[in-house]
Image (cartoon, rainbow, N blue to C red):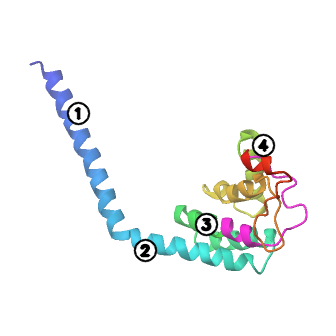
Amino acid sequence: MPGWAKALIIVGIILVLLVVGVIGAGVYWWSHNKDALIARGKAQVTEGRNAGLTTDNQGCVDQSILRYKAGPGLTGTIAANLFMQNCLEASRPTSGFCDDVPRETDFMESSEWRLAQCNHVDLSSDQYCQQLFAPVQRFCERPTPRSKEGRRAFPEPSTPDEYRR
């Protein structure tokens, strides 16, 4: 067997071992940290919902940004997103809140809007900042109006046939 073939096999075996090692380390880390992560996620959901009952849409965004600034990074982004999503669902409407918010699928407009939001909150150099505003876009894309109780209101069908759609 030529030397280059032996070297190629050795490199292949090393790569497979590295991949298996990374997967093993990930499984080990997850098994030792999942309970704490799930508990933190549930806490963010509850805190967001409770905060939403006492504020309006813009107040939810403001609180989420303050929380993120206190604990930035990937996990801070996830926590802020959970908080904001649940806060927005429970909050009072803010007049004009969704007027200038582009759809997430309008990639260029969405990117420009998110950058502008990051500049507005003094996080333009933060690599995760743009992700902080995804819950706002998802919230504003929802087609149904909000009810006074802070829940999404679904229009009643005017005829029984509309139930079948």
Classify residue 28 by image quadrant.
Answer: bottom left
C-alpha span from label 1 to label 2: 37 Å
Residue 18 showing in the rendered view: yes
Q: Secondary structure at mark 4?
A: helix
> Which residue is denoted by mark 2 in the rendering?
36
- Picture residue at 29% right of the left edge, 57% below the top: 25
Pick the quarter of the image with the C terminus.
top right
C-alpha span from label 2 to label 4: 37 Å
**Is 7 located above or below residue 40 in the figure?**
above
Identity of the amino acid at label 1? Gly
- Front one among 54 and 70: 54
Q: x and y percent of residue 74 in the render?
A: 53, 61
**Is 37 located above or below residue 6 in the figure?**
below
* N-terminal label among 2 and 3: 2
Classify residue 96 by image quadrant.
Answer: bottom right
Between circles 4 and 1, the one closer to the viewer is 4
> Is the residue under label 4 in contact with that under label 2 (CB below 8 Å)?
no
> Which residue is denoted by mark 1 in the rendering?
12
Q: Secondary structure at mark 1?
A: helix
> Which residue is denoted by mark 4 in the rendering?
109
Identity of the amino acid at label 2? Ala
* N-terminal label among 4 and 3: 3
Farthest residue toward the left?
1
Give left or right: position of 41 versus 112: left
> Which residue is denoted by mark 3 in the rendering?
82
Identity of the amino acid at label 3? Leu
Between circles 1 and 2, the one closer to the viewer is 2
Q: Is the stretch drawn in magenta largely helix, strand or loop? A: loop
C-alpha span from label 4 to label 1: 44 Å
Q: Secondary structure at mark 2?
A: helix
Q: Which residues are magenta?
A: 84-103
Q: Secondary structure at mark 3?
A: helix
